[in-house]
Image: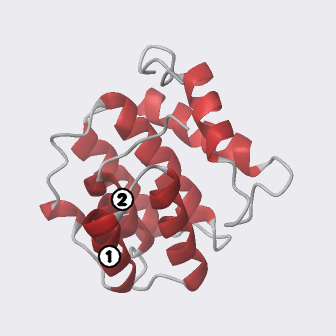
Amino acid sequence: MALKLPREAFLAIAAVGWSDGWMRKKEAAGLLRAARVCGLDGADLAEVEAAAAKAPSLETLDLSGVGAWEAAVTYAIAVWLAKLDGVVNAEELANLRTLRDRFGVPQPKLDAAASAAFDVTCLPGGASVDSFDFEALEARLREKLPALSVPPAAG
């Protein structure tokens, strides 16, 4: 799989998950599965595990190293995580807007990223933490955001 995201992306996703004051077990499991699928391990994964247990601050995260493609992937995963419990509340929407503003990616591109996450959620098993298809998410993001898309990894 070519989806790779830095630790900071998952800390931002965790902050969105904590928007309502707690992170449900399903959200924490989704966050950690996404982090593993997207290449985190060792100390970076441990930091994300800690963020699943105690909320990080979105405002203090250094997201300057997150490029436009990574921002779109991060946003898509954050939207998926926010919807895992069946409700996206006002606090989650506010943190998604903060994330958008921090990334500086135009809203239509992030809307397309959110739409890609929704498309994958509609696939059989797509609403499940254990079976959400991150490869399908990557494919949908490449279709919807070709200008941001990085070439697939060789191999």
Residue type pointed to by label 1? Ala
The quadrant of the picture occupied by the C terminus is top right
Q: In the rendering, at what x and y percent does residue 39 appear?
A: 42, 51
- In the rendered view, how is the structure colored? secondary structure
Q: In the rendering, at what x and y percent does residue 38 appear?
A: 46, 49
Q: How many marks?
A: 2
Q: Is residue 150 above or below residue 46?
A: above
Q: In the rendering, at what x and y percent does residue 93 appear?
A: 45, 60
For residue 80, side relative to residue 67 (left or right): right
The quadrant of the picture occupied by the N terminus is top right
Tell me if residue 66 can be seen: yes
Tell me if residue 106 can be seen: no
Pick whichever of labels 1 and 2 is earlier in the sequence.
Answer: 2
For residue 132, side relative to residue 52 (left or right): right
Element on which disc 2 rests: helix
Residue 10's disc is 2
Q: In this view, does 116 lie above or below 91?
A: above
Residue pictured at 68% horizontal, 38% vertical: 136
Label 1 close to label 2 by CB (< 8 Å): yes
Residue pictured at 63% horizontal, 68% vertical: 84
Residue that extends furthest to the right in the rendered view of this protein: 124
For residue 83, side relative to residue 54 (left or right): right
The local crowd at label 1, few if under 14, some if 14 to 19, many if 20 or more residues have their Cα within 10 Å, is many
Element on which disc 1 rests: helix
Residue type pointed to by label 2? Phe
Residue 51's disc is 1
Alpha carbons under labels 1 and 2: distance apart: 9 Å
Residue that extends furthest to the front in the rendered view of this protein: 155
Quarter-of-image position of residue 19: bottom left
Quarter-of-image position of residue 144: top right
Q: Is residue 155 above or below residue 136?
A: above
Residue pictured at 17% horizontal, 62% vertical: 59
